[in-house]
Image (cartoon, rainbow, N blue to C red):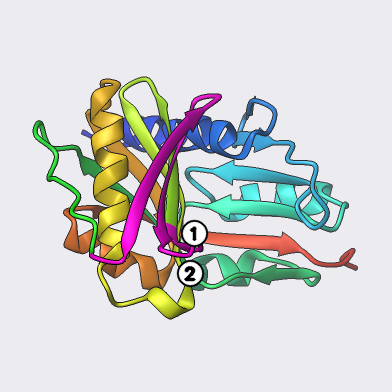
Amino acid sequence: MTGAIKTTQIDTVRAWVDGWVISRDTPPPVTEPWGYRVDVGLPGHLARHIVPAPTPALIRHLTGTITAPGTWLKLCAPAELIAPWLPSGWAIDPPEYMMTARLPAEPAVAVVPPGYTAAVTTRAGVTVARLLTAAGEMAARGQLAVTGTMAVVDRVETASGHRRRGLGSVVMRTLTAAAHEVGATGGVLVATPEGRALYESLGWRLHSPMTAAVLRSASG
C-alpha cells in the first residue's frame, strides 16, 4: 500500500511539472534524486526545485548547495513542517495547495454571464480561456496544458472589479471542456488559499499542502 501511495504522489507531481513547463514556456524539467528542477531563467525566479517528499536531510542538502538568490523550492509539505528546516536567507510564501480532480465524462456547460464574452485560444499546447467585458477588458482568465491524460490548470485569476460574479467557475468549466476534448481524464493544479474554495466547489480535492520557499539572500 505504501508503494502505491508514493507512486501516485510522484506521478501526480510529475504531471503537474510537465504541464507547468508547457504553460510557462520554460525548458523541460530535469530529473534529480530529490524530484525535479526547472531552469526558469527569470529575474527573481532563476530556477525551482520540486520535491515530492521533503525530509530534513534533503532540505539541508538543497539549502546547503543552492547559492543563487531567486532560486525556489516547491515542497509537498505544510509550511509549519518546512520552516524549522530552512536556514537564514530563505523566505516562505503564503501557503499553497496541490489539488486534483477526475474530470467528468460530460463536462458542465459554461454559461457566460450577461455583459461578458468568452474567448478561447490554443497555441503551442496551451489553451487560454478569457472572459472579456463589452469594452474588451480582461475580467477573468485561466490556462491549461495537457500532458498525457492530465490537464494542468494554471494562472486562473479574476480582475478585482469583477469578483464574486461566478467568473472563476465559468473559466474553470471552459478549461475543463477544452481538456475533455483532447482526451484528458484528470486534472491537477496548485491553488492559493483564495482559489482553493473555488476549486473545491467544483469538485477538486486536496492532494497535498505545498510550501514555496525562496532564497532571498545568501545565507551564512
Foreground of the two, 182 or 117: 117
Kindly identify the amino acid type of the residue bearing the numbered disc 2.
Answer: Pro
Point 27% across, 73% down: residue? 165
Vertical arrangement, residue 13 with respect to residue 219, above or below: above
Q: What residue did someone put label 2 on? A: 95
Helix, strand or loop for disc 1? loop
Give the left or right position of residue 71, taking residue 77 as reference.
Answer: right
Quadrant in the picture for the C terminus: bottom right
How crowded is the residue under tag 2: few (<14 C-alpha within 10 Å), some, or many (20+)? Answer: some
Is mark 2 in CB contact (under 8 Å) with mark 1? no
Q: x and y percent of residue 145 in the render?
A: 45, 32
In the image, residue 145 lies in the stretch drawn in magenta: no
SS type, badge 2: loop
Q: What residue is rendered at 32% in x and 53% in y?
A: 171
Residue at 63%, 28% (x, y): give it: 29
Q: Where are the magenta residues, as a range?
A: 114-140
Residue 186, visible in the rendered structure: yes
Residue 108: give x, y in percent of width and height.
Answer: 12, 45
Seen in the picture, residue 166 relative to 151 is either above or below; the reply is below
Residue 4 in sight: no
Rendered view: 102 above or below 217: above
Image quarter hosting the N terminus: top left
Q: Earlier in the sequence, mark 2 or mark 1?
A: 2
Q: Which residue is mark 1?
A: 136
Three-letter amino acid code of the residue under disc 1 = Gly
In percent of width and height, residue 52 lies at: 48, 43
Q: Is residue 1 above or below residue 113?
A: above
Q: Does the magenta segment cover residue 139?
A: yes
